[in-house]
């Protein structure tokens, strides 16, 4: 067999015979942590996710063993050099005893849910400062670009692109009215995106996070009967006494709100 024919056979074999590899939950997080997450997912209690909040010299502790996600998160952390880092791991059980991995329509449905940034408007989180639930985003919508800021409808896709960049304007009742860049990446078993602030985030009149100094990564990995959801919020916050602890706690509660938002929309896909 000639070299060209051998190469052609190899390409055909890789495309049509070798299936896309999808890791199990145990392979992604280890047996012990997988058991904890499954127990939490089956629990009726409020605390159903693993959380790590770190200040000053944070390290990554909950990151799943997924090559695409690991590279993305570690490169993001290296470039940002965060002083605050909050991670969560959450297991979303697919309804109706579903055990098979997502199909093309479900994958597209999930992608369209996480690009529907207008649906973030009105979600709530628990404010420790106020001791009550509070609105997270008062408004949220896609815009054409950071300069013009013209509102656009949420995009819709029949097939998720491998990469996508969206810009959004979101009014946060804690950190003010800001513009963000959302960068999406997809794979056979994963959908992930990173949110980066393009404007300075303030608390009242105090600037606490400069532009491009906040990034939040959220990844959904299909493991058959469930989705493993990993989130990490990282920031280089201004050194204000007591502000680091406040921001770290705020990020933790806000990630919970985002996970609740995702779970409700995932339920619309896996019917």
Image (tube, rainbow, N blue to C red):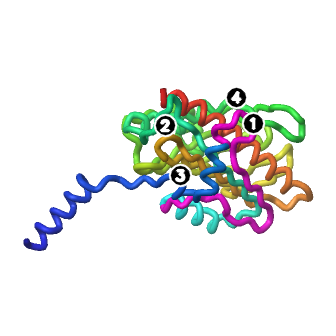
Q: Is residue 208 magenta?
A: no
Task: For mark 2, give the secondary structure.
Answer: helix
| Of marks 1 and 4, the one in the foreground | 1
Residue 50 among magenta residues: yes
Return the residue at label 4. Answer: 122
> Is mark 1 in CB contact (under 8 Å) with mark 4?
no
The residue nearer to you, when weighing 166 against 16, is 16
Residue lying at the far left of the rendered structure: 1
User: Which of the two labelled residues, at mark 3 and mark 1, occupies the earlier sequence position?
Assistant: 3
- The label shown at residue 110 is 2
Tag 4's secondary structure? Answer: loop
**72 sits to left or right of 250:** left
- Look at the picture and state if 147 lies above or below 23: above
| Residue annotated with mark 1 | 46
Left or right? Give the position of 163 relative to 132: left
Q: Nearer the viewer, mark 4 or mark 3?
A: 3
- Asked if disc 3 and disc 1 are in contact, CB closer than 8 Å, the reply is no
Which residue is at the front of the view, 60 or 136?
60
Residue 233 is situated, as x and y percent measured from the top left of the image, at 68, 53
Looking at marks 2 and 1 on the same chain, the residue that comes earlier in the sequence is marked by 1
Instruction: Tell me the quarter of the picture where residue 64 sits.
Output: bottom right
Specify the segment rendered in magenta. 40-67
Q: How many marks?
A: 4
> What's the distance in space between the residues labelled 1 and 4, CA to CA?
21 Å
The local secondary structure at tag 1 comes to loop
Q: CA distance from mark 2 to mark 1?
A: 24 Å
Vertical placement of residue 139 versus 28, above or below: above
Residue projecting furthest to the right: 241
Task: Say which quadrant the N terminus sits in.
Answer: bottom left
Residue 208, located in which quarter of the rendered image?
bottom right
Quadrant of the rendered image containing residue 74: bottom right
What is the number of the mark on residue 25?
3
């Amino acid at each position: 067999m000639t070299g060209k024919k051998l190469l052609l056979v190899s390409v055909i074999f890789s495309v049509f015979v070798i299936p896309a590899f999808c890791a199990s939950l145990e392979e992604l997080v280890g047996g012990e942590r997988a058991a904890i997450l499954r127990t939490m997912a089956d629990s009726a209690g409020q605390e159903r996710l693993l959380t790590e909040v770190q200040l000053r010299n944070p390290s990554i502790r909950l990151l799943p063993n997924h090559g695409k996600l690991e590279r993305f998160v570690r490169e993001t952390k290296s470039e940002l050099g965060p002083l605050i880092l909050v991670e969560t791991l959450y297991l979303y059980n697919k309804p109706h005893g579903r055990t098979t991995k997502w199909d093309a329509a479900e994958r597209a449905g999930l992608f369209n849910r996480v690009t529907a940034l207008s649906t973030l408007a009105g979600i709530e989180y628990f404010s420790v400062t106020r001791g009550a639930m509070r609105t997270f985003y008062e408004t949220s919508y896609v815009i054409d670009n950071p300069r013009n800021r013209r509102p656009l409808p949420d995009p819709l896709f029949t097939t998720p692109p491998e990469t996508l960049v969206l810009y959004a304007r979101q009014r946060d009742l804690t950190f003010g009215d800001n513009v963000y860049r959302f960068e999406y990446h997809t794979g056979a078993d994963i959908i992930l995106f990173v949110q980066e602030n393009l404007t300075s985030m303030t608390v009242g009149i105090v600037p606490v996070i400069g532009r491009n100094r906040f990034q939040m990564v959220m990844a959904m990995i299909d493991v058959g009967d469930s989705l493993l959801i990993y989130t990490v919020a990282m920031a280089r916050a201004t050194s204000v006494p007591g502000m680091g602890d406040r921001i770290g706690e705020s990020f933790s509660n806000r990630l919970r709100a985002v996970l609740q938002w995702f779970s409700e929309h995932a339920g619309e896909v896996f019917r």
